[in-house]
Image (tube, helix red, strand yellow):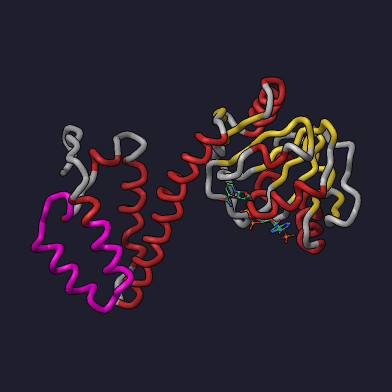
Amino acid sequence: MQIVIIGSGNVASVLGRLCKQRGHEIVQVVSRNTSHAKLLADELKCAYADYNEKLNDSAGLYILAVADTALQELNKSINLGTKLILHTAGSVSKEVLKDISLNYGVLYPLQSLRKEMEYETDIPFLIDGNSAETLTLVEDFAGTLSTNVTKTSDDERLKLHVAAVVVSNFTNHLYAIAEDFCKKENVDFALLTPLIKETAERVAHFSPAAVQTGPAVRNDIFTIEKHLRILADHPQLKYMYIKLTDSIMTSPPTPSPKGEEA
Ligand SMILES: NC(=O)c1ccc[n+]([C@@H]2O[C@H](COP(=O)([O-])OP(=O)(O)OC[C@H]3O[C@@H](n4cnc5c(N)ncnc54)[C@H](OP(=O)(O)O)[C@@H]3O)[C@@H](O)[C@H]2O)c1
């Protein structure tokens, strides 16, 4: 498949490389900032352009991997007739593309992607299309990139994006404030890495509510008060600690799986 990539950020770079690896040809990278377009195009060994220059109109697929806000703006400036165009956003309806082409859809990577990183395991994709025929085309294409492809509506994708923000962006933020706490208190954050891995690995096998551990689920007020005293000089972390402790304590009890500590 000949592909034009519009955008040059994290998703454009990771998908561009993956498409090439899987035997597709990237024919052009188009981006608002010419130097960003050139950087990715040089890596993918293809042509590049900014939005004032001519879009290659002979490709079979156009992947629009730009900031959510830019999708609305580009909608007014590109017309691709019947060419297949896909955006990569979790919380934007596929209908944002309806004035660009008669065939449009979504190729949303349900993964946290950074262009500096290598991805060895399959990236999960949530896909959509504006008709049964388009959806089949998207499914066939996504199947060349990953074995983990799921059809979802705009509404389902939006809900999964909310859950994705909680499990990935929020937990990472908690790691960041815990790291800051460790630095200020002169203890080694790296010692927590096995615990972080174990907690993440566990939810692949058990419902998270059923494997909750820690002082809040044990109703251990003595330990919680000790922690809050240590956190007196860390107001942001203390705030999060109190909110999350309260959330855990007020969650309905769930039976623990056999053999797990409660
Ligand atoms: N990163 C992830 O983990 C991830 C995962 C799944 C889905 N997504 C979605 O994929 C899309 C791209 O995300 P990303 O992480 O690749 O973003 P990013 O790294 O910040 O790159 C954003 C891209 O959008 C372009 N852009 C920004 N504002 C623009 C505007 N006003 N007009 C035209 N172009 C503009 C930038 O072009 P220039 O650099 O040329 O200015 C850049 O190429 C978003 O919809 C995001 O929600 C991201």
Q: Residue at (17%, 73%) from the top-left corner?
A: 229
As drawn, 123 above or below 247: above
Ligand 1's image quarter is: bottom right
Is 210 magenta? The answer is no
**In which image quadrant can residue 56 be found?**
top right
Relative to residue 149, is residue 96 depicted above or below? below
Front residue of 129 and 258:
129
Most distant residue in the left direction: 222
What kind of secondary structure does the magenta stretch mostly adopt? helix
Q: Quarter of the image for the N terminus: give it.
A: top right
The correct choice, above or below, for 67 with respect to 150 in the image is below
Left or right, 131 with respect to 56, comes to left
Taking the image as shown, residue 171 lies to the left or right of residue 57, namely left
- The residue under the point 84% across, 41% down is 79
Asked if residue 47 is positioned above or below residue 179 in the image, the reply reads: above
Nearer-the-camera pick, 187 or 134: 134
Tally of numbered discs: 0
Between residue 238 and residue 39, name the one nearer to us.
238
Q: Quadrant of the C terminus?
A: top left
Q: Position of residue 187 (x, y in %)?
A: 29, 72
Residue at image x 72%, y 54%?
8
- Please state the horizontal and vertical placement of residue 215, each as a whole percent of the image: 16, 55
Q: Position of residue 253 (x, y in %)?
A: 17, 40
Q: Residue at x 57, y 30 (%)?
A: 149
Which residue is nearer to you in this view: 103 or 88?
A: 103
Magenta stretch: includes residue 243: yes
Q: Residue 228 appears at what percent x and percent y?
A: 19, 69
What range is drawn magenta here?
216-245
